[in-house]
Amino acid sequence: MSILDKFAPLGQSYAQLRELGADPFAVTFDSMRSPVEATIDGRPVLVFGSNNYLGLTFDPRMVESGIEALRTYGAGTTGSRIANGTYLGHTSLEHKLAEFFGRRSAMVFTTGYQANLAMISTLAGRDDVLLLDADSHASIYDGSRLSAAQVIRFRHNDPDDLARRLRRLEGQPGDRLIVVEGIYSMLGDRARMAEIAQVKRETGATLLVDEAHSLGVLGANGRGAAEEAGVEDDADFVVGTFSKSLGGIGGFCVSNLPDFDILRVCCRPYMFTASLPPSVVATVQRGLERMVEQPELRQTLHRNAHRLYDGLSAAGFILGPEPGPIVSVRLPDVAVAATFWTALLQEGVYVNLALPPATPDSHPLLRTSVTAAHTDAQVDRAIATLTKIGAALGVLETNNG
């Protein structure tokens, strides 16, 4: 007997996936030639499987900022901010984030996953209740597991169900913390922020919005779904990540609550994790500046998203509910999805293979991500390649009558 025996069923599923020719965990990029072009096994590949929404990963000013900070401060901090001190760049980035969101305070975390883990597990205590959208990201669920609070799931993007569940809690002690995402990471649909904010106001709950996939994507200034819906004042906490539109890594939380900074000495994932290297901080701060300076990147992203979504929809694919930077193709079963994904890679198009139970309705997905850096020709090539393979596999609605 081995302690790893409990994972045997998962190992069998993984082996079956490899037998179908698909091993998304083994894909290695030999090089990145641009934000949307790479080489895999010596072959050129178009990348439609990153979250590099604004295409900033190769921005020259961002790269140079990172190099300068690397030379000035070294490779890393080698410890947490509590133990090893805060570097000037950390506080500078927090001030810039607070200013960008129009908030009083900001905290920077080492990853976006850690930001959700820290905030949710710290804010919701033993007598409190967490209300999570059923399609929440793994980091949200993991944060809830670390919390001592009662956890209630409400139906995906259903403010009425949220309201019903909150009403059932009337008279019970403790705070209520609602957690939603601006854009959901699997199907790319937006939260119904205006209605959710109304429920929050009517019930006196607290609202945390994870704008990981909507930062730089939604809103007049790119602040996310709450800005787009005009309900920023209702978002008591905004969590996000630097690993998508800002092209780096790390996470953050901003808030207007006056006692927010007390969280620095009670958020265990913040206190006991090494802080971001100064080179990453410098790169992200310059990325934030670029996002503000170039709103046309957001416009190009949306144009490309509509082009991809409309093209795949016209071809007969079953897609998520609306166009956006995440365009997911729904497939009937894992075998078809694995075969499709492998064929795409052989044709030089890289996308994400998303499998149950990580997908919302237990159907596998080919999850494509479009960026501001994709050209019309590249988007059209992706549409044509997907359509050719989809027709051969018989998964287009037009093929199914």
Image: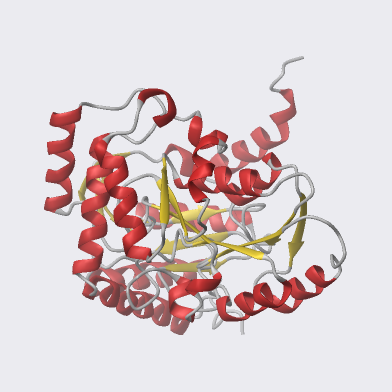
Q: As drawn, is 248 to the left or to the right of 338?
A: left
Q: Is any atom of residue 23 visible in this view?
A: no
261 or 87, nearer to the observer: 261
Q: As drawn, is 167 to the left or to the right of 187?
A: right
42 or 271, nearer to the observer: 271
Residue ID at (15%, 44%): 65
Going by the picture, which residue comes out furthest to the front?
258
Q: Position of residue 324 (x, y in %)?
A: 43, 73
Q: Position of residue 18 (x, y in %)?
A: 54, 40
Disc tally is 0
Q: Is any atom of residue 220 visible in this view?
A: yes
Q: As drawn, is 286 to the left or to the right of 140?
A: left
Place residue 308 in its image quadrant: bottom left
Up-down relation of residue 108 to residue 312 (above or below): above
Residue ID at (24%, 67%): 292
Residue ID at (50%, 61%): 366
Q: Position of residue 337 (x, y in %)?
A: 55, 58
The N terminus sits in image quarter: top right
334 or 125, nearer to the observer: 125
Up-down relation of residue 217 to residue 38 (above or below): below
Q: Position of residue 357 (x, y in %)?
A: 67, 52
Place residue 2 in its image quadrant: top right
Q: How is the image coloured?
A: secondary structure
Residue ID at (25%, 51%): 285
Up-down relation of residue 216 to residue 174 (above or below): below
Place residue 287 in its image quadrant: bottom left
361 or 231, nearer to the observer: 231
Up-down relation of residue 152 to residue 32 (above or below): below
Going by the picture, which residue comes out furthest to the top?
1
The C terminus sits in image quarter: bottom right
